[in-house]
Image: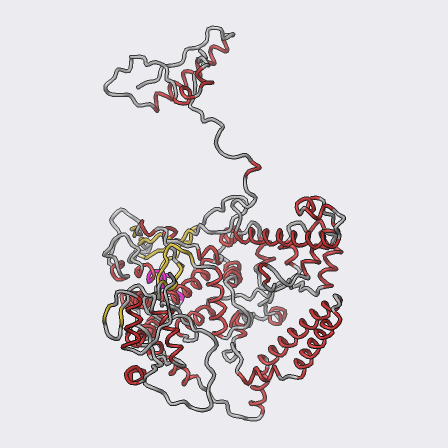
């Protein structure tokens, strides 16, 4: 129904004003005529009474006002919602790391105020940390930073790692400019802080292929499910091809993906396309512009072991993430076609699974490995996993996810296909100086001799000597053997440092002088540094031994073939199949054969996701015994032994790897602890060996004791 036009005031002055009001009224009427809808059951000519709004009827102040002839009331909201500016929390929309650093600094400042209160009780400002911060001088800030460098214990009495880099002072404290540069320089030199940045060793595609192969084949690192191993490989692949940060990749959800079949502009068959729009990117003061990465499938690619299509489609098909329930394989996806007049065919994902994480959390729930699709994998879990696989690969130092940005960022910067502006958009940088200051590797790969001599530089060689795999050594020990530990602990230098620490503690125990505490801390630091120095020397000893063996013409046995055969013997059959499919290379020029190679690899990924690997390995690897112990068959041990050392539940579970099924524990007590921790709290109380179901935990305990001679010690707390 039409709204009545407002009547003009008769007392409005000049004709110019009347014309202006008339024109504006006409324009507003035309706009309203273009937007309102009339009721078909009523006439347009019938004027309706002027509308009153709910806010006017409910508010007494508005009811007392009479509408002015020159206008009408609008349904404007009252200013009684929201909060004032000072009520907004300081940590609103801040990154988790920023909040943690601020809390750490606030806690240390309060501890510092407490120490100054005990030292100077006559000064009242130290009793209130906030007031002390407002009145703090440059000298107070300088002494506070010096005090922080001496801290040894943190939250709940935990030992601190300490500050070793001069850049940490600027990272932890937001206002370093309040302190004179001479003060910062003195603290750096007095405490021996490192002023050089990290090496920023890049990781290239030549490193990730063998690295993913190590992840898929090694038996030194186990997971609950094979799905977790696939996740690590996919993380490396996406980090290499999208140059995203660790937090952004871990926040990927199914709703951030768009799968489609794109029409080939060259007239070929449709091309599968994956589009990533990561929302968990780094923000500062405002929303970051989201960028979308389009990743088309590459036929005749170098390898499938780091192909994001193979790994990502394997996870999606395993999770049955597509809206069409009959779409369960890559082969069925290739049978789809694009309709005439269209350029693409969208393959929608299930809306109910939009909030599922690509890198979800997996843990044991009542003894059963369970996917927590709506929970994100923690950053610490992924970081520790990458470090472990880097050690297994033989890489030097701790491998971290930021090295993808060093390598791939350098490649796209030098490719010539990416402009400077697009490079900044990909890296999420506001200035080109950011990449130069924080991401460009400090070890230059410029072939200076050839360039200066006017020759063509050896790009391949210079890239090989500056990437991560340059320092690879598979003989670099992850754990020390008993002989190596004895060699370090019995070293004269370590014995001398240990004796000096003992004497310092004895002197303090007799005299109780506070000045001796600094001496004890210094002796502890010397002991730690001596042990670290001996460890580094031991790890560098292998090169010396190799040179001595070669100079003395001593034959070195090559055990690569033996290790390869033993490695394959310990693999799960589906794991071996997965390796064969992912490491295959194109053998034909036929497109259909290449499609089949890709599709078979995706099917192998789907099958391996549900493989039970037995869980993470606990403790250090077992040392090689000089005397052989006669091996016992698990089946005969379960049938004849009065105190069996094998687990009847694991032995009867054919889904587990043979190494886990046939595991022999040290004694019957270890079997009991394993049974109580892993099998007694499973969802379904079923004896795999006897194939019977039990109704209660106590009944399961009685069955294990009477039939299988395993005495459970678990008791329910009432």
Horizontal relation, residue 83 to residue 328: left or right: right
Q: What's the magenta bit mostly, secondary-structure-wise?
A: helix
Residue 275 or 712: which is nearer the viewer?
Answer: 712
Q: Residue at x 54, y 74 (%)?
A: 471
Q: Magenta part of the protein: which range?
A: 306-314
Where is residue 447 drawn, in percent x and y?
59, 70
Q: Residue furthest front?
A: 718
Q: Residue at x 55, y 51 (%)?
A: 99
Q: Is residue 307 magenta?
A: yes
> In the figure, 16 relative to 203: above or below?
above
Where is residue 468 drawn, in percent x and y?
52, 70
Can residue 120 be seen here? The reply is yes
Q: Is residue 183 magenta?
A: no
Where is residue 277 drawn, in percent x and y?
42, 51
Horizontal relation, residue 364 to residue 519: left or right: left
Report the quarter where the C terminus lies.
bottom left
Residue 421 or 601: which is nearer the viewer?
Answer: 601
Q: Residue at x 67, y 58 (%)?
A: 148
Where is residue 98 drawn, in percent x and y?
56, 51
Residue 308 or 650: which is nearer the viewer?
Answer: 650
Q: Residue at x 65, y 73 (%)?
A: 529
> In the figure, 448 relative to 376: above or below?
below
């Amino acid at each position: 129904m039409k709204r009545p036009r407002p009547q003009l005031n008769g007392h409005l002055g000049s004709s110019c004003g009347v014309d202006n009001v008339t024109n504006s009224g006409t324009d507003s009427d035309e706009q309203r005529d273009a937007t309102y809808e009339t009721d078909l059951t009523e006439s347009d000519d019938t004027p309706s009474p002027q509308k009153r709004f709910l806010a006017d009827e409910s508010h007494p102040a508005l009811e007392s006002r009479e509408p002015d002839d020159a206008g009408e009331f609008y349904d404007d909201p009252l200013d009684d919602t929201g909060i004032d500016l000072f009520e907004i929390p300081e940590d609103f929309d801040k990154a988790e790391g920023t909040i943690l650093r601020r809390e750490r600094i606030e806690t240390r400042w309060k501890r510092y105020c407490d120490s100054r209160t005990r030292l100077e009780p006559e000064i009242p400002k130290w009793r209130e940390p906030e007031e002390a911060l407002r009145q703090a001088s440059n000298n107070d800030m300088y002494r506070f930073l010096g005090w922080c460098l001496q801290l040894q214990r943190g939250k709940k009495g935990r030992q601190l790692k300490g500050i070793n880099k001069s850049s940490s002072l600027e990272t932890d404290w937001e206002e370093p400019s309040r302190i004179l540069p001479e003060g910062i320089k003195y603290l750096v030199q007095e405490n021996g802080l490192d002023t050089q940045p990290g090496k920023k060793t890049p990781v290239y595609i030549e490193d990730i292929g063998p690295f993913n192969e190590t992840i898929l084949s090694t038996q030194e690192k186990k997971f609950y499910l094979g799905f977790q191993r696939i996740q690590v490989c996919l993380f490396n692949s996406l980090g290499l091809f999208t140059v995203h940060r660790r937090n952004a990749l871990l926040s990927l959800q199914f709703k951030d993906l768009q799968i489609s079949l794109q029409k080939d502009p060259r007239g070929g068959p449709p091309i599968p396309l994956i589009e990533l729009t990561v929302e968990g990117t780094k923000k500062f003061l405002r929303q970051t512009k989201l960028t979308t990465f389009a990743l088309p499938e590459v036929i005749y690619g170098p390898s499938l072991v780091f192909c994001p299509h193979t790994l990502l489609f394997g996870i999606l098909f395993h999770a049955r993430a597509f809206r069409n329930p009959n779409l369960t394989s890559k082969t069925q996806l290739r049978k789809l076609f694009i309709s005439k007049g269209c350029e693409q065919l969208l393959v929608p994902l299930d809306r109910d699974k939009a909030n599922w994480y690509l890198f979800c959390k997996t843990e044991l729930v009542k003894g059963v490995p369970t996917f927590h699709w709506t929970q994100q994998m923690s950053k610490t879990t992924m970081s520790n996993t990458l470090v472990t696989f880097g050690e297994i690969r033989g890489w030097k130092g701790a491998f971290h996810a930021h090295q993808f940005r060093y390598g791939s960022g350098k490649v796209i910067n030098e490719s010539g296909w990416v402009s400077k502006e697009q490079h900044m958009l990909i890296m999420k940088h506001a200035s080109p100086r950011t990449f130069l200051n924080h991401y460009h590797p400090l070890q230059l790969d410029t072939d200076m001799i050839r360039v200066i001599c006017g020759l063509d530089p050896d790009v391949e060689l210079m890239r090989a000597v500056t990437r991560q795999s340059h320092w690879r050594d598979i003989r670099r020990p992850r754990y020390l053997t008993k002989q190596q530990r004895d060699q370090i602990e019995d070293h004269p230098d370590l014995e001398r440092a240990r004796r000096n620490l003992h004497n310092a503690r004895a002197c303090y125990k007799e005299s109780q002088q506070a000045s001796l505490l600094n001496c004890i801390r210094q002796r502890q630091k010397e002991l730690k540094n001596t042990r670290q120095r001996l460890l580094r020397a031991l790890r560098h000893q292998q090169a010396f031994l190799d040179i001595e063996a070669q100079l003395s013409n001593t034959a070195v046995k090559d055990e690569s073939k033996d290790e390869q055969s033993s490695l394959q013997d310990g693999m799960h059959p589906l794991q071996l199949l997965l390796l064969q499919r992912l490491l295959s290379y194109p053998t034909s020029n036929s497109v259909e054969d290449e499609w089949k190679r890709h599709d078979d690899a995706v099917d192998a990924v789907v099958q391996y996701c549900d493989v039970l690997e037995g869980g993470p390995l606990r403790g250090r690897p077992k040392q090689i015994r000089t005397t052989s112990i006669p091996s016992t068959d698990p089946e005969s041990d379960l049938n004849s032994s009065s105190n069996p050392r094998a687990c009847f539940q694991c032995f009867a579970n054919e889904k587990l790897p043979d190494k886990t099924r046939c595991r022999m524990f040290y004694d019957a007590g270890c079997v009991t602890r394993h049974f109580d921790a892993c099998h007694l709290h499973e969802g379904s109380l079923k004896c795999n060996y006897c194939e019977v179901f039990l109704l209660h935990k106590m009944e399961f305990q009685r069955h294990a004791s009477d039939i299988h001679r395993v005495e459970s010690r678990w008791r329910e707390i009432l």
